Structures are given as structure tokens and as C-alpha cells.
Amino acid sequence: RSRKLQLRLLCLRSEVALQEEDHKQALTTSAEAIRLDVSEPKALLLLGHARNRVAEYPGALRVLGTARDALEAMPMSELSAKSRALLAQTHCLMGQAHERCRQYAAAKSEIDKALRVDPNHLSTLSTKAAVLHHTGHSRDAERLLWDCLALDPDHVDSRLLLGYIELCSGNCEGCIKTLEDLNKRSSSGNILASQIGAAKAYQALAYECNARNLGKPRLAEDSVRQAL
């Protein structure tokens, strides 16, 4: 009983560390949890998530694959709602690791598996949009992200990615508006410091683009300083 409680506490500490972007702590506590139970899917998922954050994608895929195998050992019909959520998140994180390695076919396979478990899994839908963008389907990616925001206007990954795609496509005003909305929502506490930093950087580039289009380079420099 005390072992199970210790495992839960370590997983909770790892989740808090991920939210605070203390990746060293997240890696350490999730690894400790796995030492207590090498087949615990939640601990494996948290270690995979932490490894994704520090760009250790091959290592992330290994532990996430172990988590997936543990969860899929039972028939889908017998999985609890909690286990189904873990399975969807595991496939999502595997999809993200493949996407960041530019392994888009593998990413799409994991995304499809996650969406079969939960068709409205927003992090998976956002990852799907990233794959669409990187494979030349930016319009489809934008439409998908707007669908995500219709489901949850506060979904940070979707709003941040939408702003980035708008910036890449030259829609600087759209990017500014999208990221202004993100900044307004940052007080909710659900946004990471790195996401705030990325939003400011994209917004600065969008302001600079607008100013240069107006033929006002000095205004462009001022806009960048103001955004950052």
C-alpha cells in the first residue's frame, strides 16, 4: 500500500515539474517511479513526456512504446476511462516525437491511433495540424486548429500553432490577433513560460513584417522591442 502511495506521489511530483518546466526534476521523479514499478503506464508516459520536452526523442519513443504495450495488453472494451485517456495521450506523445523528428508518416500513424481512442483529443488534433502544415497542407491545418479552438478557446497549443502558421503564410495581422488572444488568456495559469516566450517572438516578427510592409523600418524595430 505504501509503495502504491509512493508511486502516486512521484507521478504527481513529475506532473508538477512538467507544468513548471523543471525538466530535470520531471526526468528524475518519473524515473524513480518506474524503478518502483517498471510496468506502470502513467510513470512511463511522464518520463516519455519529459524526454520529449528535452528533445530526447528516441528515448521518449522507447518508454512510450512500453507504456502503450502495457495499456494495450487488455482489450479496448475492458479499459477504464482513465486508461483510455492514458492510451490516447501515449499515442499523442509518440506522434509528437515523430513529428519533431520529421517522421511524418509515423507521426500520422500514431495520431490516427490516438484519435481512434478519443476523436476530440485536442493535443492530438493540434499535432495533426502541425503534420499537415509541415507536409504542405497549411490551409487544412488552419481549419483544423479553428475547429480545436471552437471546442476549447483556451487550448494554448492550438492557438500558438495557429499564430505560427499565420505568420509563415504572411498573414501578419491574423497572427497578431491570434497571439493577442493568447496573451489575454495567459493569466489562467495553463500556459507554460516557454509558450509565452514563443508567442512574444512570433508576435514580434509579425509586427516587424507589418511595419516593413508599410515602409517604416524604424517602426519595425520599435514594434519588435515592444513585443519582446
Image (cartoon, helix red, strand yellow):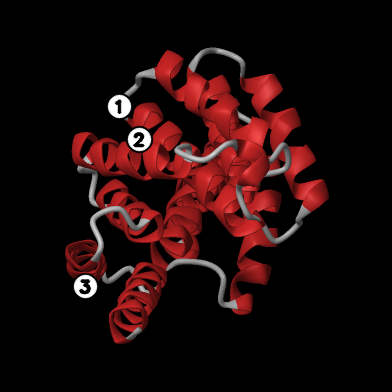
Q: Which residue is mark 3?
A: 25
Element class at badge 3: helix
Q: Nearer the viewer, residue 84 or 159?
A: 84
Residue shown at 69% from the left, 21% from the top: 139
Q: Nearer the viewer, residue 119 or 197?
A: 119
Crowding at mark 1 (Cα within 10 Å: few <14, some 14-19, many 20+) = some
Taking 93 as reference, is 63 left or right?
left
Q: Quarter of the image for the N terminus: give it.
A: bottom left
- For residue 213, say whether it is visible: no
Label 3 and label 1: CA atoms lie apart by 24 Å
Q: Nearer the viewer, residue 144 or 221?
A: 144
Residue shown at 25% from the left, 68% from the top: 33
**Residue 166 percent across, percent down from the top left:** 62, 34
Please report contact status of discs 1 and 2: CB closer than 8 Å, yes or no.
yes
Crowding at mark 3 (Cα within 10 Å: few <14, some 14-19, many 20+) = some
Q: Which residue is mark 1?
A: 101
